[in-house]
Image (tube, rainbow, N blue to C red):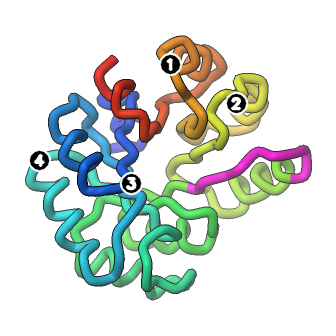
């Protein structure tokens, strides 16, 4: 299934940062779970729980304790967890995930014009499957990135209500990711 089709089926993504959030995400209609916690000892079990709920499991490789920012960490996730993809701020890790047939999501913090330029270069050079832009409450930046790429865009960070979700969609985002559990049920 193509990245855009996955997001069309589940435009609100549950981003979970602990066991409580994980259990709550299972009650939601969110078909994609971003796993923002765990360690090398328990990440396989966390992913297994997500997969048992027939949801897409995406591991934030930068946030799993015990992993180095090296391609071998992505190899481990691929071989041992059954995760459908990874998120990382490191383009080489995203590229490795794609090489392994996993979804590779590049996370980019849009803090200034230099970050915008760097992100545009990384999109061109590494061609991630998806791009997660933070913070997600900056429709102008989302629109500018949308103009330069056809890669699916996920708005994330600081989204607090349905109005901000709609602003992100109107600006060109294909999905939003949030840890706010009340937004998983809108």
- The residue to which callout 2 is attached is 142
Q: Residues within 10 Å of mark 2 (few under 14, many from 20)?
A: many
- Nearer to us of marks 4 and 3 is 3
Query: Residue 182's spot in the image, x, y percent?
Result: 35, 25
Query: Residue 171's spot in the image, x, y percent?
Result: 66, 19
Q: Residues within 10 Å of mark 4 (few under 14, many from 20)?
A: few
Q: Which residues are magenta?
A: 106-114
Q: Earlier in the sequence, mark 4 or mark 3?
A: 3
Q: Earlier in the sequence, mark 2 or mark 4?
A: 4
Q: CA distance from mark 3 to mark 2?
A: 25 Å
Labels 2 & 4 near each other (Cβ < 8 A): no
Q: Residues within 10 Å of mark 3 (few under 14, many from 20)?
A: some
Question: Quarter-wise, where is residue 38 in the image?
Answer: bottom left
- Residue 17 vertical placement versus 47 (above, below): above
- Tell me the SS state at disc 3: loop
Compared across the picture, whether 89 is left or right of 55 comes to right
Q: Which mark is residue 53?
A: 4
Judge whether residue 18 can be spotted in this image: yes
Q: Earlier in the sequence, mark 3 or mark 1?
A: 3
- Tell me the SS state at disc 1: loop
Q: Is residue 121 magenta?
A: no
- The residue to which callout 1 is attached is 161
- Nearer to us of marks 2 and 4 is 4
Residue at the image point whose x is 27% and y is 33% from the top: 30
Q: CA distance from mark 1 to mark 4?
A: 26 Å
Q: Earlier in the sequence, mark 1 or mark 4?
A: 4
Compared across the picture, whether 62 is left or right of 127 comes to left
- Nearer to us of marks 1 and 4 is 1
């Amino acid at each position: 299934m193509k990245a855009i089709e996955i997001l069309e089926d589940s435009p609100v993504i549950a981003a979970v940062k602990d066991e409580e959030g994980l259990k709550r995400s299972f009650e939601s209609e969110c078909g994609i779970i971003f796993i923002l916690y765990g360690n090398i000892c328990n990440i396989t079990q966390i992913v297994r729980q997500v997969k048992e709920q027939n949801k897409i499991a995406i591991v934030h490789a930068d946030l799993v304790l015990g992993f180095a920012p090296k391609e071998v960490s992505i190899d481990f996730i691929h071989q041992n967890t059954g995760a459908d993809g990874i998120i990382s701020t490191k383009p080489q890790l995203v590229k490795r995930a794609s090489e392994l047939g996993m979804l590779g999501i590049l996370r980019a913090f849009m803090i200034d014009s230099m970050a915008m330029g760097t992100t545009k270069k990384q999109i061109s050079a590494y061609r991630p499957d998806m791009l997660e832009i933070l913070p997600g409450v900056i429709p102008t930046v989302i629109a500018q990135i949308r103009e330069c790429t056809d890669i699916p865009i996920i708005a994330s960070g600081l989204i607090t209500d349905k109005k901000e979700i709609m602003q992100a969609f109107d600006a060109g985002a294909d999905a939003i990711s949030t840890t706010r559990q009340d937004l998983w049920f809108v």
